[in-house]
Amino acid sequence: MDGRQWNELRPIRIESGVLPNADGSAYVEMGKNKIIVGVFGPREMHPKHLAKPHTGVLKCRYHMAPFSTDPRRSPAPSRRDNEITMVMRYALEPAIFLERYPRSSVDVYAEVLEADGGTRCASITAATVALVDAGIPMKDLVVACSAGKYNGRVVLDLGDYEDKNGEADMPFAYMPQLNKVTLLQMDGILSAEELDQCMNLALEGCKKIYEAQREALKKKYGLEKVEKPQEKTAAEPQEIDEEEDDA
Amino acid sequence: MSNKYGITSRLKLKKIQETLTTGKRLDGRGLLDTREIKIRTNVLEKAEGSAEVYMGNTRVLVGVKIGVGEPFEDTPGEGVLMCNAEFVPIASPAFEPGPPDENSIELARIVDRGLRSVGVVDFSKLDIIPGKKVYLINVDIYILNHAGNLIDASAIAAIAALRKTIKPVYEVKDGEVIATGKRVPLEVLKTPVAVTMLKIGDSLIVDPSADEEEAMETRLTVTIEDDGNICTMQKSGPEGLTLDEIRKAINIAKEKAPGIRSKIEETG
Amino acid sequence: MMVGSMLSTSTPFESRDLVIPGDVLFEGSIRTGDNTYRSQGKVYATRIGLVEYGRGIVSVIALEAGYNPLVGDLVVGNVVDIELGTWVVDIDAPTEAVLNVPEAIDAPFRPDIVMPEILDVGDTIVAKVVDLDRKRTPILSILGKGLGKLEQGFIFRITPSKIPRLIGKKGSMVNMILKETGCNIIIGQNGRILIHGRTREQEEMVVKVIERIENEAHTTGLTNRIQEYLKQLKG
């Protein structure tokens, strides 16, 4: 509908470490979606009576800004917001070493500043980058995107219009190195074959988004590495001693 | 508070007070120096107007949405302006998720009163079916990073967003309100600027950082409109102020406002 | 991601390559060092950082990590609560730390002790982590030279993972800063640093230097650059 191919992702841009007060953060733009995620933790869980003695707790919150949609939406959490909060948690939990932090919580807050379909997937993608940025130990990254059916055709990464007017929407989240699916939802009607096509399509989409996550994480340190060769020539004679010092 | 416990460290308080007696602040600023202000407008597509403001590390995003609704009972022939502020948890470990607390409500009301008292728009021109349907202007303030002085940053973002707001035009056809599909710029008549000052010891400081806010005895916000008149005031905090201190604060605000106003006007 | 390292078997990365969680660092038998985990015969990174292949061991030097309390750590913390016989201290760890009365006054707890007179909510302390209880709560002590309540200076915070770089090998980096600036500096392993100088200028110099070290912690040749920077700042 927006000129893309059936298996083409919307343009994606991810930036890590954007919020100074959060322990970790990330900003993602996917098509017209604009989502910012902040992570705090691991920190003492409050209220204490909800803390778990043998493992940490992952607390998520998915929230949409009133100006993120047309028409304006109320800032109070809707039932949909609560449901997405829950599936976000299920999508991210398998990737985090929560058992290392008994009595603590890791808090993930996703704020949707502008919405255009597929916000839960973009939120999960951004949340993962924020978790890594916060130094939370993880087994793998979690990548998410949706596939579905619009106008009789199986398509990748549904925008808002396609989601509202199509035949099916399937949000999908995946851990690429461990090859495990952590989020799978579907609304609409799909034959078993079409569902299979959707999952393969989503998998391919996730692989591309994974590259974007990696780039975003590396970019924060990339500049330093580029400067290094220049620094090296200036300090060449002392370089050998320095290596020992840096160990 | 910039920490989760809401407890101020004594060491920090002492350091802030000590440094202030030398006429400087922890970050090297003079008492009346504001941090660098950066304003970007039209940052959101789905909002009719938007602006993002950085004041030092404080970051505020405002989205303006224009819809149609019922007028206030006491002003049936006028459009409606509503300001709302969200202190979202990503902005600070001190912010809990949930409905607006008294601080975010106070901030929204200060910004609202600043816009309303100057008559930022001609509300009487924003009626559609007088008494029944009028334009609703929703100004939603989103704090993205709390590094102090949320009020002033939010006020700048609000007016900067309004100045760039494009209003969808509605008309009445057969007694029904319909969207014409046409859009016109919202006519903004004034540019109010809020200046918040903190009293710590004997010093009055402008554009407080989050640390300084923890050390505050009391706070005074003065909003100045284009002609140099005062249009809104708000005193907040546990301690009192002498009349002289108030007069001094008002003068400071009047001095600072034009500089901030030109920054806003630079965005067009 | 090319091979060609000094190891006898080829590795997916070279030492000091940037890796992210989930990256396969090694396949086969090798000891797992910091920030790695083994699953199904492969060793993966758990944090973003620089991979290090040592002799028979692979580890990751994390670029981002929260503070993980270890027994023996020197920490700088804030008292946030007072319970019976115990002060609760925030040290920026996954859980709050506790300081029990006997570890503060070298005498057993007596009901007539007025705890806020010794340490009150809002006070800042330098303490040692002496134990981690069954629930991984850090147990602190302020008995000992250089420990106790802090009355002067201010706290500057950096990422805990950069603290070793700030200290330097055998204290080389921090000693250089102390010498050149004349400030008193107490470095907490939890990323909190107390800075106290005789003049504001000295303190600001220290802050600038620490900020620079934090930004460039993962690069080489840092000690020399910081020495130059200090000379530059002193004018």
Image (cartoon, helix red, strand yellow):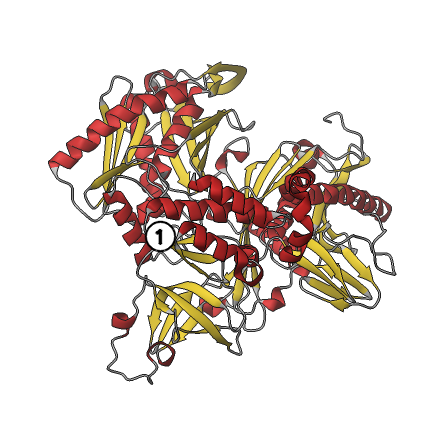
Q: Which amino acid does the dot numbered 1 rest on?
A: Gly
Q: Position of residue C73 (x, y in %)?
A: 50, 69
Is C71 above or below relative to C220? below
Residue count near mark 1 (Cα–Cα under 10 Å), binned few <14, some 14–19, many ≥20? many
Relative to A103, B132 lies left or right: left
Q: Position of residue B102 (x, y in %)?
A: 32, 46
- On the question of residue A90 being in view, the answer is no
Q: In what quadrant of the picture does the C terminus of chain B appear?
A: top left
Q: Position of residue B91 (x, y in %)?
A: 46, 45
SS label for mark 1: loop
Q: Nearer the viewer, residue B22 or A7?
A: B22
Q: Nearer the viewer, residue B245 or C15?
A: C15
At x 63% / y 55%, what residue is drawn?
A: A246
Q: Nearer the viewer, residue B138 or B214?
A: B214
- On the question of residue B184 being in view, the answer is yes
At x 71% / y 36%, what residue is drawn?
A: A158
Q: Nearer the viewer, residue C5 or A190?
A: C5
Is C125 above or below relative to A217? below
**Residue named by callout 1:** C197
Q: How many badges with numbers are in the image? A: 1
Q: Position of residue B76 (x, y in %)?
A: 31, 24
At x 41% / y 63%, what residue is drawn?
A: C77
Q: Residue pushed farthest left?
A: B243
At x 32% / y 26%, what residue is drawn?
A: B193
Chain letter of mark 1 equals C
